[in-house]
Image (cartoon, rainbow, N blue to C red):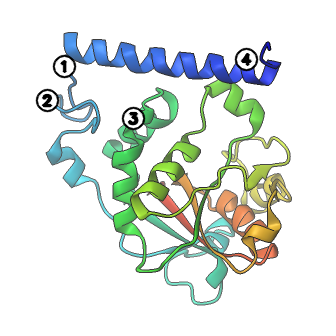
Amino acid sequence: MNPTGASARDLARRAASAALGWSADVAELLWPQRCPACAAPAGAERLLCEDCRAAIPRVAFSLCARCLAAGREPAGCGIHGDFQVWPAWLYDERAAAMVRAFKFEARVALAAELARELARALPPARFELVIPIPLHAARRRERGYDQAGALAEALGLALGVPCLPGALTRSRATRPQTGLDAAGRRRNLRRAFRIQRPLEMRGRRVLLVDDVITTGATFEAALAALGESGAHAVGAALAWAQ
């Protein structure tokens, strides 16, 4: 039986991903990887050399997505317990190189290494589900993959926790947050997320994953949607772009 249009597109994406992986292997053989931050030798699966990786500033505290979205001090909030996000790194030029390669250059093989970094930043809590903050379908088609989904799946494997990538979806496309004030960011993302499996969320400890937290508005909206479903959710981001 011929595949449906959706299946055919999925097969095409898988074929493209396989081709990218094969070409990356060939490129690594012919042109050994160099660290984009200092040009020292570096493995393709880690991108940065050991010194540059170790030099990325770590974050040892959580951020309040609600306070951050409102333009208030996000560290040390004792009011909005349902809006806490744990970032692994501060977004410097080395973290930016990692995020850029993973997010825009189809270096999805970095997901396992990035997930290990993120796992080390998490609080000592037991989670039952891992869920990514999703791209809208139109943006995913443009990019060819969902980087937050790949990171969440790798983090779920690292933690031994199931990942449910379809549990949270974007109900509508949103404009970029850049240039919007706090009120505009919130309006832009109001009701932008929908829980597809609300009964599976109720009472569960959920880890919500994205690559970068910047304005906090995306995490705020997604955590609010999970909270409305009865989930006890905590956010995790690879880097905090201040």
State the mark number for residue 32.
1
- Which of the two discs, 1 and 2, labels the residue nearer the N terminus? 1
Asked if the residues shown at circle 1 and circle 2 are in contact, with their CB atoms under 8 angstroms apart, the answer is yes
Question: Of circles 4 and 2, which is in front?
Answer: 4
Q: Secondary structure at mark 4?
A: helix
Asked if the residues shown at circle 3 and circle 4 are in contact, with their CB atoms under 8 angstroms apart, the answer is no
| Gap in angstroms between the C-alphas marked 4 and 2 | 39 Å
- Residue 233 image point, x, y percent: 64, 73
- Residue 231 image point, x, y percent: 71, 75
Asked if the residues shown at circle 3 and circle 1 are in contact, with their CB atoms under 8 angstroms apart, the answer is no
> Can residue 5 be seen from the camera position used here?
yes
Residue wearing tag 3? 109
Q: Is residue 173 left or right of residue 118?
A: right
Asked if the residues shown at circle 1 and circle 4 are in contact, with their CB atoms under 8 angstroms apart, the answer is no
Q: Secondary structure at mark 2?
A: loop
State the mark number for residue 69.
none
State the mark number for residue 8.
4
| Gap in angstroms between the C-alphas marked 3 and 2 | 18 Å
Question: Of circles 3 and 1, which is in front?
Answer: 3
Which residue is more in the foreground, 57 or 71? 57
Q: Amino acid at mark 2?
A: Pro
Kindly identify the residue that appears in the image at 62 percent across and 27 percent down: 143
Q: Residues within 10 Å of mark 4 (few under 14, many from 20)?
A: few
Which residue is more in the foreground, 201 or 142? 201
**Quadrant the N terminus occupies:** top right
Q: Determine which quarter of the picture holds residue 191.
A: bottom right
Residue wearing tag 2? 41
